[in-house]
Amino acid sequence: MSSRRSQFWMRMGTRFLPFADAATTELPLGRLLRLSLFQVSIGMAFVLLNFTLNRVMIVELGVPATLVAALVALPLLFAPARALIGYKSDNHVSVLGWRRVPYIWFGTLMQFGGLAIMPFALLLMTGRGAVGGAWVGILGASVAFLLVGAGLATAQTAGLALATDLSPEAKRPRVVALLYVMLLIGMFVFSLIFGRILSGGFDPYRLVGVIQGTAMLTMLLNIVALWKQEARVVGGTRRIAAPDFATQWRTLTGEPRMRRLLIALALGAAGFSMQDILLEPFGGQVLGLNIGETTAVSALWSAGMIAGFAYAARALDRESDPHRLAGMGVLIGIAAFAIVVLAAPLKSVPLLCLGASGIGLGGGLFTVCTLIAAMDHVSTDKSGLALGAWGSVQATAGGVAILLSGALRDGFEALSMSGRLGVGLVDQSSGYSFVWHVEIALLFATLVAIGPLARRTDEKRSRQLPQLTERLA
């Protein structure tokens, strides 16, 4: 009876906690969850930069959306380096005997430094400081955002590679997926926390406290996450005999299916990312929501992402095709953006909430399924390179999309408000609506790119079916 009860609770755990079976004897669940704290800190920084601060800068501080988009996109200048960071951590030479820990630690230090100087730079940029002009603030803010971006890229890439090192080969995709769920949980929780703290109205002193508190919490979470995770190699690590980075990169991207997957990933990441800096300002300017309410909309987006990850986990357990699931996420995203477009003329906050949740759900499905599909293309000794390639393409495409979104919104709004596009478009929501339609077009292009991958999987299964039937007979 005791054995049956144990089996029952094990089945219940894996049924309602889709990633509970990611734990193994080598990597117990407690240790895995502690390691995942570095993803929680990254989710916290992502919410602060992409959701809370862009709303504060555009609405409360009056910074042009183009400048805000440029600042938010600056951290993603390091996105192309993720593949190189993964490769370097695979082959890092250290007398201390660590490969991944030095990259995670110095990435954490860069995050801390950028967040420490960021609030003062933002206040100087808007003319609220007593020293220097706006250009000093813009320069300081640029350095701060660059430091945070470099730290995020370095710590996340090396941290994900460390997780794959610690887990058995069969569990690696699920471990990486669990880490991304923790990223989204961090985004959801801190969206609510930041919204609660800033709900009483804008206060410069409170803003400084929030950003510097984030810096301190980043250090604390990452230290706890790293503690006694990577075993030291006695006598130090040695370089592994392997082709150079350029050769391995050409081999990885030279495979046709991998190349098509990366193209679909770039289009989808751009399509889902253009709204990152505009969704909260849209709620504030068009629908009249305050800071706490717009941050709650971001929390709904994060909750949708978590739901997408959970559904993908259960579907992949049933051996569903990750390419097909990614395409399903794109379709959900198209419908969600159409709902957000309708929220402006109808002045409907519930439609905005529904659309934000749908964008998160579709983006979560697309993200985790393309990640697992990319990992299926490489051997285990190249996990850092594969994760870096996926991360670099996703982050680079997302950064370019964020940068363009601010310029497109400002440019189209200027044309529409001047009356050059007709009386019907003289509305504050026109610039936002134009960006939503661009995202819908990008997601349709993503479907075109990813469709052949799912079709080829179906063809492969149809060829294998007669063989399986013959074996069963």
Image (spheres, rainbow, N blue to C red):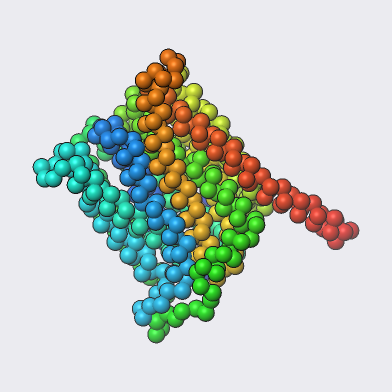
Quarter that holds the N terminus: bottom right
Percent x, y of residue 308: 54, 43
Q: Locate residue 461, reporting x and y percent.
A: 76, 53
Q: Residue at x 87, y 59 (%)?
A: 470
Residue drawn at 44 percent across, 60 percent down: 82
Say which of 313 and 152 sits in front.
152
Which residue of the protein is positioned furthest toward the left in this rendering? Answer: 130
* Residue 307 point in image, percent of width and height: 52, 42
Is 386 on the left-hand or right-hand side of 448?
left
Residue lying at the far right of the rendered structure: 473
Residue 100 in sight from this viewpoint: yes
Which image quarter is the C terminus in?
Answer: bottom right
What residue lies at 51% left-to-right and 73% top-to-bottom? 244
Quarter holding residue 216: bottom left
Query: Taking the image as drawn, is residue 296 in sight?
Result: no
Is 380 in front, or is 310? 380
Quick one: 171 or 451, which is closer to the camera? 451
Q: Residue furthest bottom?
A: 235
Seen from this angle, which residue lies furthest top? 423
